[in-house]
Image (cartoon, grey):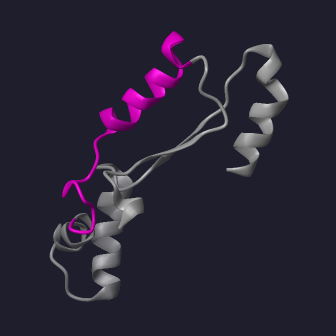
Amino acid sequence: MGMTQSLAKEVALDAITVNAICPGIIQTDMWDYNDRVWGQMLGDFAPGELMASWVQNIPMKRAGEGKDVAALAAFLASEDATYITGQTINVDGGLIMS
């Protein structure tokens, strides 16, 4: 967050925006790996069981999709976001509130 804000201040007068996107649990190969490997390390979890338990902590009760993160990235890169800078934005279905 500090680096994002620092860089945003440095380049603001050049009309360059700097923001950080912080994804939560997103349906990706990495999270499939975490489910499988951590499931074995933490006990006898069947594939998908550990992930399902993590998702229960998300207020929206679902893992995110790549398009959820991509939509934010596209918005921040668009003309509609030219006055947004120095922000850290969570894409996590509300998990940070839990």
Q: Position of residue 33 (x, y in %)?
A: 34, 63
Kindly indicate the quadrant of the structure image that contains residue 88: top right
For the C terminus, the quadrant is bottom left
In reply to whether residue 76 is colored magenta, the answer given is yes
Q: Position of residue 23 (x, y in %)?
A: 44, 48
Query: Range of the magenta residues?
Result: 56-81
Q: Is residue 98 above or below residue 79?
A: below
Q: Is residue 69 above or below residue 57?
A: above
Name the foreground residue: 30 vs 72. Answer: 72
Q: Position of residue 36 (x, y in %)?
A: 28, 70
Answer left or right for 7 relative to 39. Answer: right
Tell me the residue at 35%/60% (across/down).
Answer: 95
The residue lying furthest to the bottom in this view is 43
Q: Is residue 49 above or below residue 60?
A: below
Answer left or right for 73 relative to 60. Answer: right
The residue lying furthest to the top in this view is 79
Tell me the residue at 47%/28% (across/down).
Answer: 73
Q: Position of residue 69 (x, y in %)?
A: 39, 37
Kindly indicate the quadrant of the structure image that contains residue 83: top right
In reply to whether residue 34 is colored magenta, the answer given is no
Answer left or right for 90 relative to 43. Answer: right
Name the foreground residue: 12 vs 37. Answer: 12
Q: Is residue 43 above or below residue 58?
A: below
Answer left or right for 19 relative to 78. Answer: right
Tell me the residue at 49%/14% (across/down).
Answer: 80
Total tally of numbered discs in the picture: 0
